[in-house]
Amino acid sequence: MDKNEALRYHAEGRPGKIEVIPTKPHSTQHDLSLAYSPGVAAPCLEIQKNPADAYRYTAKSNLVAVISNGTAVLGLGNIGAISGKPVMEGKGLLFKIFADIDVFDIELNTEDVDKFIETVKLISPTFGGINLEDIKAPECFEIERRLKEELQIPVMHDDQHGTAIISGAGLLNALKLNGKEIDRIRVVVNGAGAAAISCARFYCALGVKKENIIMCDSKGVINTRRTHLNKEKQDFVADTPFDTLAEALTNADVFLGLSVANILTEEMIRTMAPDPIVFALANPDPEITYEKAMHSRKDIIFATGRSDYPNQINNVLGFPYIFRGALDVQACGINEEMKLAAAYAIADLTQEAVPENVKMAYNEPTLAFGRDYIIPKPLDNRLISRVAPAVAKAAIQSGIARKIIYDWEAYDNELEKRMGHDNRLMRMMINKARSNPKRIVFAEGEDLKILSAIEEITGEGIAHPILIGNKAVILRKIKENKLNISTPDIFDPQAEQNTLEKYTELYYARRQRAGILPDIARKHMQNPNYIGLMMVENGDADGFISGTQTPYRTLLKIAKEVVGLRACCPYAAGMHIAVTKKGTFFLADTTVNSHPSAETLECVTALTYESVKQFDIEPVIALTSYSDFGEYKLGSPAQIQTAIEQLHQKYPEMLVDGEMHASVAFNKELRQNAFPFSTLGDKEVNTIIFPNLSSGSIGLGILKELGNHEIIGPILLGMKKPIHILPMDCRIRDIVYLTAVAVSDAQKKQAIDFCPIENRR
Ligand SMILES: NC(=O)C1=CN([C@@H]2O[C@H](COP(=O)(O)OP(=O)(O)OC[C@H]3O[C@@H](n4cnc5c(N)ncnc54)[C@H](OP(=O)(O)O)[C@@H]3O)[C@@H](O)[C@H]2O)C=CC1
Ligand SMILES: CC(=O)C(=O)O
Ligand SMILES: [Mg+2]
């Protein structure tokens, strides 16, 4: 890491890393009189009557103090209060980005334990929780113990417990990989400070036998021959002949370093038991470098505190979510049960398939549970929804929560929304699919993106996938990329000549009067897209997904030819879903009709209406334009006016209106004031129909590129059977989502065949 770059990063623009942002309107004099005097007196008096109301009227419930005196900053030692401020601000940044918790960092200029405790107590009313940081041992133990006893809010010295929880999760997973029993392993802990003592204690809570732990400090092994030991070290005195780290390590199963850089050698590691676990966690430089550790032996499982090597054991995987869970149930503290719950949740999460966005963020396409991945990556956004609820539940069950959560699904949604990754909609769709999975054929079965999606699809039980492709190639790719797909259902065209012959005959019979010659029919059946579509046509599969290697329009043409459009509706359309901070919106047509007629717009709207309902959402639809309700009578506004007339007549129950500007659609006050006659009334619009493909495609592109929104789709509407076409640059997530939609389509197949739109024509 370049020192100058780090300095520039901190100094550039507004110096430092965090700022305070108001959460309430403050633009008018009236706003200010509410925010400050005289309005502010009202909440003051309420809190005076009932101090718990501070959680209701102030930022307390979401505010954590990160407090340090700078006596053990990272592995830099006692560098003083103000020198540690960049680390504390850094923690503030991490609390905010990973768990939406606000932080005031506080640097106390004292090494006096009583003064420190007294100060924290005096400022504690401001906060919902207190994160003690980088305070040296042994003072940190007394400081934390007394503050926990005397305060009724969560207090945690993160170097102690955060490190214990994360390295504990790493230990559980490493043991799962090397097959050793936790109650039989021999552990050598190097360092006997804040982190080391707490980790050793936590490992005992996880099942390590205390008599199997040997601890070393700067003077060597803490054994019965040592004198002048502090209380915490006395707790780990070992009755052993060993005096040095090197002696203690012989045949040990685990090395846990929480000390200083470069004190572990390759020779020492070579004396350890088979499949040794080495956690060299000193920051910023570990007890042994990654390169040396890897060179020492092949069977090692190795972790450091650094982000530039595999297995980063860093408390950032814990503290944001532990405090999130504790704050959300207004816990009086953070107890052993909550810590254990966090460690198990983190360990379990590591064993699940790694989502594509995490693999991409770290540029590690084959990331999977194993020796190089015993702990989740910090950018894994599943951490909040796994760790925070586990901690909150443990607080409730152990009786230290002041607020009980009853609806865990709602809490989960709240967490997702808080972090802006609200994927409730697709989760609902996935659950729907899981309830009755269908056979979905993937024409591009050899494609790695498709295979990665299949891992998720089978893992979640969304569908029974059928992969078209060369069997040996597919199996090799699964193996090479360590994908967890146990018995894939593969349709290898080379080995299925009889079936292909049958499909050729069927296809020819159907298309012979559309200019298709037998040879062309046979040639088409060499193309996996034709084969997959024929499988659906012939009832050998319930749905079809393809597109990573074929342009959208080419594939749409083939799909129309083989499967066809629904009888009731001579048009197809593409719909995207935009998940934004303001809510979820459905947008159509974004992929198919470049110059739609009034009839096309009517059909696109009806198809979109039907599809939005499939997501259990009542559509409120605006047909958008550059004109409002008849303002212009030519071009697309006129077509919309005709379409709206037809829609109002044929679908009286449909909440649809237009034409209108997008701002009129989204601003219901404006709409109600200027156009009180609109049939949309006071409803919030959730579905936008574009007047043509140019505006649809441009609108979508702007949302995608400038809005930082999750865009899902395109969902193909209007086909006779469940067919979905992927964009060539799709993400694995898109494949999983469209598969869930295809399964849901297939579940509703009867309804599609019946075709409700037809009745209105
Ligand atoms: N990866 C992570 O998530 C975390 C890493 N850490 C790292 O762990 C280290 C310790 O932090 P912390 O516990 O807060 O600090 P403390 O100051 O509380 O403890 C440091 C300990 O290291 C011991 N030590 C110093 N030199 C040696 C040596 N040559 N051999 C053996 N032990 C030695 C000290 O021994 P003595 O008691 O004799 O002085 C002391 O017990 C730091 O490098 C820190 O960055 C800490 C928290 C989290
Ligand atoms: C990570 C951390 O908290 C430390 O090294 O002190
Ligand atoms: Mg620290």
Image (spheres, rainbow, N blue to C red):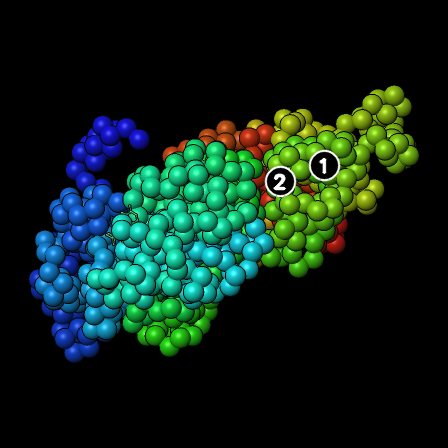
Circle 1 crowding by C-alpha within 10 Å: few under 14, some 14–19, many from 20: some
| Residue 470 visible in image | yes
Q: Nearer the viewer, residue 279 or 687?
A: 279
Q: Is residue 177 above or below residue 627?
A: below
Q: Callout 1, which amino acid?
A: Leu
Circle 2 crowding by C-alpha within 10 Å: few under 14, some 14–19, many from 20: some
Q: Nearer the viewer, residue 331 or 251?
A: 251
Rendered-image quadrant of the N terminus: top left
Q: How many marks?
A: 2
Q: Dot 1 corresponds to which residue? A: 475
Residue 630 position in % (x across, y down): 44, 40
User: Dot 2: what SS?
Assistant: loop
Indicate left or right for 275 with 37 as reference.
Answer: right
Residue 531 position in % (x across, y down): 79, 33
Q: Nearer the viewer, residue 252 or 472?
A: 252
Residue 371 position in % (x across, y down): 53, 44
Q: Nearer the viewer, residue 245 or 280?
A: 245
Q: Residue at x 18, y 34 (%)?
A: 11
User: Dot 1: what SS?
Assistant: helix
Q: Residue at x 51, y 63 (%)?
A: 183
Whole-angstrom CA distance, mark 2 to mark 1, is 11 Å
Q: Quadrant of residue 548?
A: top right
- The disc at residue 82 is none
Q: Residue at x 79, y 38 (%)?
A: 491
Q: Quadrant of residue 417?
A: bottom left
Q: Callout 2, which amino acid?
A: Lys
Indicate left or right for 653 with 228 as reference.
Answer: right
Q: Is residue 326 above or below residue 377?
A: below
Residue 649 position in % (x across, y down): 59, 51
Q: Is residue 39 above or below residue 347?
A: below
Q: Residue at x 46, y 69 (%)?
A: 407
Q: Dot 2 corresponds to which residue? A: 482
